[in-house]
Each structure stands twice: as structure tokens, then as C-alpha cells.
Image (tube, helix red, strand yellow):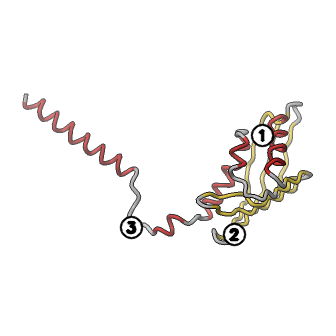
Amino acid sequence: MKKQLSTLILSLFFAVSAAQANNDLNTLSTTYDAQARYEMSENDVKSFVYQWFAAFDHQRESGYFVNRLATPVNLQYPGTPISSLEDFLAWYQGVTDNITWNSHNIESMDVQGDQQSGWTVSYEVRWKAVSKNNEKYDMMVHQDLEIIRVGDALKLAKLEAKVVE
């Protein structure tokens, strides 16, 4: 009986400790600088760009991209100016209708700016793709972006792309 009681008490102790640990998982430090927690950093901007391309790699739903575009829309892909959400949706429909696989490998990304003025981002991205006609694409594209903060979200305000290889 004494052993069973000891086991029960020990189990309760571990249950209380585990519950406390779970509460700690959702608690922010009260001593960390509040402004630093709120301000977006260069890493937030880089993450935004990488997530943008990962979404293309997985051919995400069009709403994913629309939610990340600032208005007015200003995207310049080679031979394809996009100046409205409708233009973007038509362009992306062409992508999903014609591309069966693609990947983007970002190289040499440079980020300048801050959340007050926005950020400029410059990089090279290797795009590889296979079309429904089994055409294979492999090209290096240089892109310059302008990214802005809107509320708690980053938005793509401008994109200029040109094939470099």
C-alpha cells in the first residue's frame, strides 16, 4: 500500500511538472525588449522570400500568393508585366496549367532597408521546371524586390526579373 501511495504521489508530481512545462511553452519572456520582438528583421524578409519560392515549388493555391502581394501590384517577369491581381491570377493559372514540376534555388541574396522605409532584396534564383509537353527549363534569373510591412505582414510591393543565363 505504501509503495502504491508513493507511486501515486510521484505520478501527480510529474503530471503537475508536465503541465507547468506546457504552460512555459506558450509564455513569452517578460524581460525581452518589446520593440525588438515586434520589429521585423532581415531574417523575416529572407524567410518571406524563401517561403514565396517554396510555395511555387509546391504549386500552392493562388490565394497564398494574393495574400502576400501589396496593391497596387507591380511585377515584371520576363515578357510578362503584371499590374493587377487579375493579371497575377491569369499568369499563375498559366503556370498551373502548363508546369508539372519546378524548383527554385536562391543564391546570393542581399537585403537592405528597414520596416519604416521597406526593404530592397536582390538575388539570383535558378529555376528548373518541366512542362506538360515534357519541355525542360533550367535558367538563372536575377530578381530585385521591394518588400513592405503592412500591419503584421510582409507584402511584395515590386518585382523585376530578368534572365541572366
User: Which residue does the image show at 75% across and 58% down from the upper left?
Assistant: 71
Q: Quadrant of residue 14?
A: top left
Q: Which residue is mark 2?
A: 112
Mark 3 lies on a secondary structure that is loop
Which class describes the residues within 10 Å of circle 1: few (<14), some (14-19), or many (20+)?
some
Q: CA distance from mark 3 to mark 2?
A: 29 Å
- Return the residue at label 3: 31
Report x, y in % for residue 96. Answer: 80, 37
33 displayed left or right of 93: left
The answer to which quarter of the image holds residue 99 is top right
Instruction: Look at 51% across and 68% down and name the residue there.
Output: 36
Residue visible at 62% across and 57% down in the picture? 153
Q: Nearer the viewer, mark 1 or mark 3?
A: 3
Q: Is residue 93 left or right of residue 108?
A: right
N-term-proximal mark, 1 vs 3: 3
Type of amino acid at the residue the image marks with label 3: Thr
**Where does label 1 land, which residue?**
102
Q: Residue furthest top?
A: 1
Picture coordinates of residue 24, whole percent (x, y):
35, 52
Residue closer to the observer: 61 or 14: 61
Which numbered disc, 1 or 2, marks the residue that appears first in the sequence? 1
Q: Secondary structure at mark 1?
A: strand
Q: Quadrant of residue 148?
A: bottom right
In the image, which is nearer the foreground, mark 3 or mark 2?
3
The structure residue drawn at horizontal position 43% and vertical position 66%, both measured from the top left corner, is 32
Secondary structure under the numbered disc 2 in the rendered image? strand
Residue 133 makes an appearance in the image: yes
